[in-house]
Amino acid sequence: MMRVKLIFGILILISFTHAADIIISPNQIVTYNQTIVSSQETFELGFFSPRNSVNHYVGIWYKKISTRTIVWVANRNTPLTDASVELTLTVQGVLTIRNTTTGIVIWSSTNSSTTSVKNPVGQLLDTGNFIIYEQGNQEDPIWQSFDFMTDTLLPGMKQGWNLITGTENHFTSWKSDDDPASGEFSYGVDARGYPQLIQTKGQEIMYRVGPWNGLRFSGVSNLRPNRFYNFTFVVNKKESYYQYYLLDTSVIMRLVLQPSGTLERLLWMDSKQEWSLYLLRQNDLCDKYAQCGPFGKCNIDESPICECLKGFEPVSPDQWKITDWSQGCRRTIPLECDPSEGFNKYSNLKLPDTRGSWHNHTMTLVECEKMCKSNCSCTAYTNSNISGSGSGCLLWFGSLIDIKMVDENGDNLYVRMPYSELDSTRSSRAPRRVRVIVPAAFVVLVILVSIYIFCRFNTRKQLQEVKPGNKFGHVPETGSADKEIELPLFGLSTILKATNNFSMNNKLGEGGFGPVYKGVLKDGKEIAVKRLAKTSTQGLHEFTNEITSISKLQHRNLVKLMGCCIERKEVMLIYEYMPNKGLDSFIFDKTQSKLLDWHARYHIIIGIARGLLYLHQDSRLRIIHRDLKVSNILLDKDMNPKISDFGTARTFGGNQIEAKTKKVVGTYGYMAPEYAGGGIFSIKSDIYSFGVLVLEIVCGEKNRGFVHKENCNNLIGHAWELHNKGRPLQLVAKCLGESVNVTQVLRSIHVGLLCVQRHPQDRPTMTSIIMMLESEGPLPSPKEPAFYVGESKLDTTLSLSSDEISSKNELSITMLNGR
């Protein structure tokens, strides 16, 4: 009897609407016919039933509005079927909805693992936010309804991401006017790249407002300062969110996503006792996401509405003519990462989709241009903030999607173009630059002839010994005919003494070129001697290729070629000795792998990346390695990685970006699909090999040697599956233990998957890779990789049934016939 009286008293207290700051304490109960009211009677919380519905829900609505308007629903996806229910705040600070007949909890504000708090209380604020907090600490709620919005964005709500906790807050439409269950339309902040607001229907993007430019959203030019409300978009390291708040507290306003997908800003008109439409999101054909496809621009005032950007043409002219623009546009003249490339300026645009973009808030526009131009994958840039004189940097990589012409309040975009397509070139009618470049093929031809003649001369004369330090040949290089390859010649007797007559005790391993021996010169310097075997299918071509590829290269992450020996019938290359041998001897060995903790592996990944960057971009000629694999990464005494074995490398001239060969060389498991299947190679085929290498370093397993017991995936497929399931850390080698830096590991796996994407144009450059590995910014989402082998997804580009052709130590080249 005493308990009944106590509960009755509490309910009277809760429903007493004129009391200041109604506070709910633990174990207090609100029944079906009772409500909780905010102190100024602005909002009310309780049980309700939508019209034409027999289900019951707990929600929050406006107290003073004649038309009941629900702004939040607790159990939207778990409706109540009868009124035998109660709302309770537990001693753990959890708000629960319980069926009083069965005792089953229908809904709770947090899960059962929530820890106990001292003196929890609940309160409905006049903002419409119901908060639970420790008494006396209202500014730091344990839980609040604003963090779990339904279909309505109220003033003060944060729509976006808490980057510290990793939680996201978006609103989702009702299923229908009579059913508050989650509908098919959602509206929220996409944080993949520079954050932006997008509306989705299921998994499909329907509409994108464009990135925040410091004043407004790029694609919503009519979103301007007004007398009713102000708005902001915050992007920093801790959070990323959109928020608006009222300038006049007497105004009642809400932003709601209707079941039809319409986004409406509504204003309550007290004189008419109805909601009035204050602002409706513009909705024309150009608002449809990616209406004109990649590099297409949509203009609702033109007919047809889609056109390609200048310097671009339709991918499918026939489809374009019948207004099917989905395939978009492609460049008339491909980019070649040439220094003469520049940027064309476009004005009054809704900026392209920023998923996968990169941003920096402190850079100037000039610095932004330099950053974009220095990265071959960068296709466009602009200021991230146009307020004042402009500031910040926003970079795009790959295709530009969902560009729309807007009014005079649109943004500027600077699109990368070849020199011949620059507006400045056209306007001044300046002639195209005449660039005299000696073709790389001619340089290589001269080198081959020089070395071949030298080899014949030495064989005929049967030289006994040539002292170290002699210069090997005069070889012209691009733009110069009087520079020489400074490569010492070693006499045969010197090598015999150094290797103890090629003793088996000195043998380090054997590859396609031949055996490799350790040697020690008279001065005590250790060397590695690669000796051409009589049975080798390789010979002069690979020998000269290695000399011409790396004799002039100087980089701490490339193995140093010290000289060569051509005497009698011997052909040998002499390298600096790497005491820790190949990387494969560590990561694929159960005992040795424990010696490489994560710090050492990450150091190796970065070192390999820097070596590749030098080959692809900073060396005299662009060099494609074509056989990058773990066994071709040698380790010095300090475990610094050095890329080795350039026998199959190819050099490219200034503007050359890819080539095709009838003879495919390399190692299965590391070969890109376009190279393995069609003989086409470029820097992007090296990028693919680097991606495989990174995943192997993280996992400690060979890509070709790994077969998942459940889905038959190779290592790439396994990494892709774990990435899609949000469990990438399961890929990490167990021997790494507590040495793992989670951030570095996750970025390494993500970058590895970006590198092994099926299509070469989707793979990043080494510049981008290093920036992604060493920065903290968002990363683009990888697409499905090539050679993704599983039970239901088999890449038939190349048969993978044949065994990997390689020697045990894989110190040299593997050669395969093209298919």
Image (tube, grey):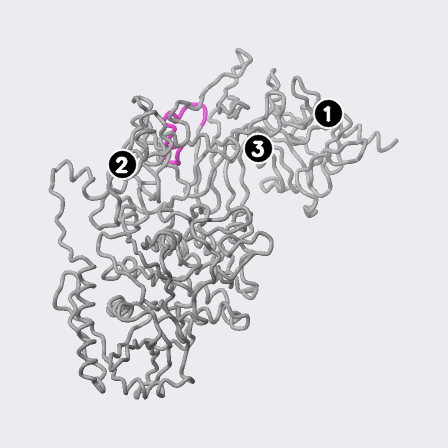
- Residue 26: x and y in percent read 73, 38
Q: How much space separates mark 1 and mark 3, taking CA atoms? A: 23 Å
Q: For residue 222: magenta?
A: yes
Q: Amino acid at mark 1?
A: Gln
Q: 736 or 188: nearer the eye?
A: 736
Extreme top residue here? Answer: 272
Q: How much space separates mark 2 and mark 3, taking CA atoms? A: 43 Å
Q: Amino acid at mark 3?
A: Met
The stretch in magenta equals 210-229
Q: 477 or 365: nearer the eye?
A: 477
| Residue 34 image label | 1
Residue corresponding to mark 2: 312
Mark 1 / mark 3, whichever is N-terminal: 1
Left or right? Give the position of 49 relative to 292. right
Residue 545's quadrant in the figure? bottom left
- Residue 67: x and y in percent read 60, 16
Asked whether disc 2 touches disc 3, contact meaning CB atoms under 8 Å apart, the reply is no
Q: How much space separates mark 2 and mark 1, taking CA atoms? A: 65 Å
- Residue 789: x and y in percent read 50, 51
Q: 393 or 546: nearer the eye?
A: 546
| Residue 759 image label | none
Residue at horizontal 45 percent and vertical 56 percent from the top: 748
**Predominant SS of the magenta segment:** loop
Q: Nearer the viewer, mark 2 or mark 1?
A: 2
Dot 2: what SS?
Answer: strand
Q: 152 or 288: nearer the eye?
A: 288
Quarter the C terminus occupies: bottom left
Dot 1: what SS?
Answer: loop
Q: Amino acid at mark 2?
A: Phe
Residue 503's quadrant in the figure? bottom left
Residue corresponding to mark 3: 149
Above or below, 643 relative to 362: below
